[in-house]
Amino acid sequence: MDYVIRVCGAAGQGIQTIGATLAKVFSRSGYFIFSYQDYESRVRGGHNFYEIRFSDELVSAPRGGVDLLIALDKETLEVDIEELVEGGTGVYDSKALEKTMDDDRFVDVPMGDIAQEQAGSRLMANTVASGAALGMLGVPSEIMGKVIEATLGTKGGDVVDKNKKAGDAGHSYAKEHCPKCAFTVTPAGKERLLIAGNEAVGFAAMASGVKFYAAYPMTPSTGIITYLAGKAADHGLVVEQAEDEISAINMALGASFMGARSMTGTSGGGFALMVEGLSLAGMTETPVVIALGQRPAPATGLPTRTEQGDLLFSLFAAHGEFPRLLFAPGNPQQIFSCVNRAFDLSEKYQVPAIILTDQLIADAEWSLDGIDLDSFVFNDYRVRGDDFAALKEYRRHAFTDSGVSPLAIPGDAKHVVVTDSDEHNEEGHIIEDAETRMRMVEKRMLKKMPLIRNEMEQPELYGEEKPDTVLCGWGSNWGVLREVTDRLNAGGRKVAMLHFSELYPFPDYEGRPWMEALRAAKKTVCVENNATGRFAYLVRAETGFEFSSKLGKYDGRPFNARDLEKELSDGHVG
């Protein structure tokens, strides 16, 4: 069983309300969920959709095709109808849309009238639509009632009761008027959690000990500051909406210098403003974590769409040479791991860490069986309290064999903690001599880099042990590559997936199974959401290996499993 529901309409019509409600119902019913959104950069109007995929088996990517189409505007009946699969069904309100469909695939549900009759307000037509969708699928409406209680409970019992009545009425109407619905929903298992990408980033940051977060809101990273702000009072966090991205990163650096684990978040345009601060972090060896949510560029580009175009920008941005960490998670478990490791390694080696997400993974939702809190590590690398006071002397940038100097907290002892954005000596004071300059560059860059590289996790190699074709990707394409790998292998191909979530320093590769698989394969395809193969470029630069082909998508939309499988089968796969 594998179904896709797409809720379509204009901004302001409550598309998110319906989509989020259905996703919660299915996850609490025990199904595996993957949902994502496609929306325009406007508060009202335009054409948008919220797509929920649910299955009795793991799903982690857009599938392609729609089984149940919920139309809240006329454009849906002209555009999204093309996505209906064989046996698919559409739901609409002919009175509200002022249009009657001469198409037996569509069921006319008077959502507005039902909402008015049952709840006294046509505004609850969205709840009717949610109930109708569940009725057509044969899903009991009781769980929807619990979701309504959990979501609207703070608004009072009258609001909850009216929404329940509206949902139940939509459920009954659809069951009665859609006897030919071809959906067969199998019983699911235990209730599952549901988490969005930005929520997972925020949760992992809290579990990693973050105490300060500053950001200027910018799609698609805004959800992180929203999540953390909602948790601030209960968890002792300081969350600051800065006036711009320059202020945000400098606030984070200041808080980090004073001893707080600190983070900021932005998108490409905001990161462009942060690069001087990034360089300051490199010079002063101040740990900081940056969440960079990618979207199509240049300039404002498509501000609410998805892309993987900022890889090399994040790698080479900021003036001068200094180490940095680059992570690109592709699912909730990788988000937890990458964010936790970003905080840990950033503080351990006193370097900035960048977590690359994108609009797809930032706004997507997945079901989870649970979160293993024991998997999070917290190592305090700071010199504090009595340990700091016991030192005979303190030099913030002392030369060491590893290049890592003691990281103390100003004011925690009698010793003075000094650093400077100019080149400096071990005490942190400005210098001009050549010898100290050379030793500091060697300390910051040449000594730390090999140690950090040894810490990087190897990429995931999945599928055939001796593949004819290797599909390679990074970040948010984990789910679609894994699914397509399974599909192609089920069809008799010999395919493996190679996925990177820890990008830089580039993992050691000589003698590794994944590198041997690449070299032995007849065809190697690098799949990315950009036009020029930015990750393929990085692999060639680091290893000398060149992929036999590159497959890019740069229209601002994600790959889906159906279309990617077809495109790969048309000449890309051996």
Image (cartoon, rainbow, N blue to C red):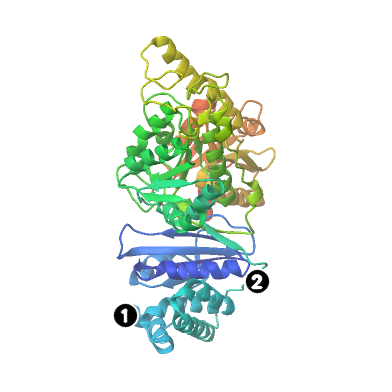
Nearest the viewer among 209 and 340 is 209
Residue 259 higher or lower than 363, as above or below: above
Quadrant of the frame with the N terminus: bottom right
Relative image position of residue 229 (x, y in whole percent): 43, 55
How crowded is the residue under tag 2: few (<14 C-alpha within 10 Å), some, or many (20+)? Answer: few
Could you tell me which residue is drawn at 49 percent across and 56 percent down?
Answer: 364
Picture residue at 48% right of the left edge, 38% below the top: 259
Q: Which mark is residue 186?
A: 2
Residue 501 drawn at (x, y percent): 55, 41
For label 2, the SS is loop
The quadrant of the picture occupied by the C terminus is: top right
In the image, residue 265 sits, relative to residue 435, either above or below, namely: below
Q: How far is disc 1 from disc 2 in space, using C-alphas?
A: 36 Å
Residue type indicated by callout 2? Thr
Going by the numbered disc 1, the residue's amino acid type is: Glu
In the picture, measured across the screen, residue 486 lies left or right of residue 288, that is right
Which residue is denoted by mark 1 in the rendering?
98
How far across and how far down the image is residue 492, in percent? 66, 48
297 or 69: nearer the eye?
A: 297
The tag earlier along the polypeptide, 1 or 2, is 1
Q: Please, which residue is most extreme toward the right here?
A: 465
